[in-house]
Structure formats: structure tokens, C-alpha cells
Image (cartoon, helix red, strand yellow):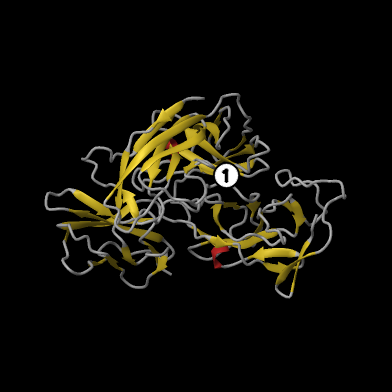
Amino acid sequence: MNRIIRAAGALLLLGTGCSSSNDACDPIAQTGCEEGLVCEEVVGGEPGCFAPVVVRGNVFDLADDTAIEGATVVALDANRSPVSTVAVTDVTGDYEIQVARQRDTDGNPMGGDVTLRADAAGYQTFPSGIRQALPVDLSSPVDMDGVLVVQTKATDVGLIALPSGAGANEIFGMIEVPSDRTGVLVVAETSGQSPQGFTAIADRDGAYRIFNLPDGDFSVLGYAQGVSYAAQDVSLSGGEEAEVNLSLSGDAPGTVTGSVHIVNPGAGEGTSYILVVESTFDETLARGETPPGLRAPDGTDLVGSGSWVIEGVPAGSYKVLGAFENERLVRDPDFGQGNTEIVRVEVTAGQSVEAPTFKITGSLDVIAPGAEGAEEVTGTPIFSWVDDSGEDRYHIEVFDTFGEMIWSDAAIPGSSGSDPEVVYGGPPLESGMYYQFRVTSFDVNDRPLSRTEDLKGVFFLP
């Protein structure tokens, strides 16, 4: 096996890093390496022991830049599967998480991006609402005393305090994670006909903590591709903490299949599909929490019109979302037409479910602000987007980070030959708060044609 160090900006292989010459290291269990080294997969070879890649950063209050102690941070891949352990911030808000990285044949960490999720008592989970995580580039770690460190502006996470009256209870515990899995989405659902889900990510060690729960009764469930869990019930009140441990059940997961029709795609070439746990779905923002692996196609690939399949789906209720990424496609907004409603599926253990067909169409491209990610604005924002040649009018809406609409104008006249611009006309915007503008175009018969993408048009004030 090989040990990695960095010298003069290059990674070098130096001798063995295994605990003994006869031991093969295990990249899931993290056994078989000397202290200070980690076991990683090697492209075209056997796993080896290397200097770890870690992400370092800080979690702070966006309103006043104060440190947040006790926040949890985890790195996720494109399928929302954890690729790190869950770190807890110290008194200064700092954290360090070790990130699994496949190595090339020379032992160098493979490039690629991850995103970060952060949770804390009294704060909105990041990412959530309209706030989306920026990708963290892992391709150029810096050697610091034998550890390969990634620390950039994107590894610092600012959190927004929840409104007064938010829940103060917590659920924590351990969940059984199979040896071939890296983590699980844990959901605490309120009781009643329309349960609300509060979530956390458990890492490969199985530890999790769910913050900001209201008083009441909860059913705690685990979700990950290919496995099922037995639910546990708990009641909370008055700022309580409750320990809830979850075990695997014998129920076989199911399969969800479906098909999509992409019409008038414009510059869009393909998209992807995810399953969102229904209790976490926000009707206003049309977003929710996706269990690790419940995405088609796998990885970061996109597909065009046609069929798709997601296997290994735990029993439960889900919303099916398509065109949720920034790929110049959106769900067809004309809900008066067939195959345009948000699709719901109920998955039974071991069964295959076919989701109704739905339509995707080309999006309205955002010009500013927020065309390429969250954008800082000063003064009164001016919103602009690429003209839809078939429109008669536009409807613009502005949401805050909690999904509350704070301003709208449904009577913006169509523009011929130029891209529309609209000056914000709502209440004063707050420093440190994130916002998003959304635009929908309508034809002369008042039929919606297209809209801006779900993850674009996000802005904030310094």
C-alpha cells in the first residue's frame, strides 16, 4: 500500500501505509491503515492508505457574523449521499470534516465537487428554502502537516435565525447503516393527516441530530436507497431532547418507474429526476428532501425525453420532481394541461410503482440577479430575464429565504425585441436575508408558457 505526501506542490507516493503488510484496508469501515492515514478506493487498483482530504470552514450567524457552536456539518455528493462524517462546530464555529476521495493510480485525490449541509438549534437548515449550497471544489487541496486541506469561501456557511416561535425540541440517536452505505436521511414526521417532516443526515457512523422540533408526537423514519427501517414514535414538549435509535427492517425496498416528455426545450438538452419525501415537500417552493441515491440517472448525468427508473426505494410517500437543477429546463407550468401536475407516488415494500407521465419545457433564462448563483445586490434590485417571444404578460414574485412571498406583480406587459427589466416594488429588504425572484410568462389566452428555473434568481443584501 502507499502513503501520500505533498512536496513542492505535487503529491508523492512514499512506501506503505497499511497497519501490516498482510492487511488490506477497508474504505467503508476505515480499518487497516496506520494512524493519520485513511483507506481510499483507487481507480483500476486495490484500495490504499493515503493522507486524508479534509474540508475546513466556519459556521456563523448571517445577521451579525457571530460564531455558532454545536452546529452539525456534512458533505454530500450529487446524489445527496454523505461523503464525510458529520462534524460539530466548536466554540469559534470552526469545523473539520474528512471527505472520502477516490485516488488515481499515482495516489492523487480525484477532482470533483461536494456540497455542504449545516444544521443548528434556532437556525434554518442550510441548504433549504431558496438557499442552495455552492459546490466545493476538491481538486486542489493544500498540504498542511500531512493533511490535504480544502478551505475556501464556499466552506464557510452563514445560517439565518428562525422566526420567533420556532420549535426548540431535539431528537438524536444512532441509525443502523449497512456496510455498503455511507449515510441515511432521518425524518421526524408530525402526526396527523398532513405530516410535516424535520430532517437530519446520518453519516456512515450512524449518528444524527434533528433540531428545532415543535411540541407534539413524531414518527421517526430512516430513508436510503436499497434499505428499509422500522419507524419509532416519540413525544416532545418544552425544549426536550429525546434519544431515538433506528434499526434495519426486513422489508424489501420498491422501484419507481416513469416517463417524461420534453416539449419546446430551447437550449435545454436533458434533465434528471428525484424522489422527495412527501412530508418534507414545500408546496410554495416545490422542493423537499431527497434520500441518498433516489435520483435518476445516477451520478451527475442528464437524460432527455423517455423513460426513467429509480430502484431501491424505501416504502413511503414521495413527490416526483424533474428539471430541478440549472439545466435550462423547468416543469411545464400550465397545470390546466394534462401531465403537468406535481406527481405523487406511494411506494409499498417490494413493489414496483409507475409514476404518471409529466412534461418538461424550456425555461426563462435569468439575466440578473442570480443567473449563476446567489448574487449580492446593493440598493433597490432590478430584475431582468430573457424575453419569451410568445408572451402577452409576465407575473413576477419575490420570496424570502423561508419561502414567504413578500411582493408580486402580475401585470407586467410583454416585451417585444428586448429583455424585460422590473424594479423591485415591495417592502424594505433585510441585510443578510436571502431572496429569490421568479417569473412566469403567459400568452394572450392567459395560459402559462414558461418560468424561470427553481435554483436561479437568488440574491442577498450585504
The kind of secondary structure element at disc 1 is strand
Question: Which residue ends up furthest to the front in the rendered image?
Answer: 44
One can see residue 175 in this view: yes
Q: Is residue 50 left or right of residue 74?
A: right
Residue at position x 39%, y 43% from top? 321
| In front of the other: 202 or 391 | 391
Task: Give the residue furthest to the bottom.
Answer: 8
Give the percent coordinates (x, y) of residue 425: 25, 64
Is residue 196 visible in this depiction of the protein? no
Where is 431 relative to 78, above or below? below
Relative depth, front residue between 55 and 326: 326
Image quadrant where residue 156 sits: bottom right
The residue under label 1 is 201
Q: Which quadrant is home to the N terminus? A: bottom right
Residue 118 appears at what percent x and percent y?
55, 53
Q: How far from the left and from the top, in percent, is residue 272? A: 42, 47
Between residue 235 and residue 130, name the one nearer to us. Answer: 130
352 lies above or below 375: above
Lateral position of residue 141 relative to residue 156, left or right = right
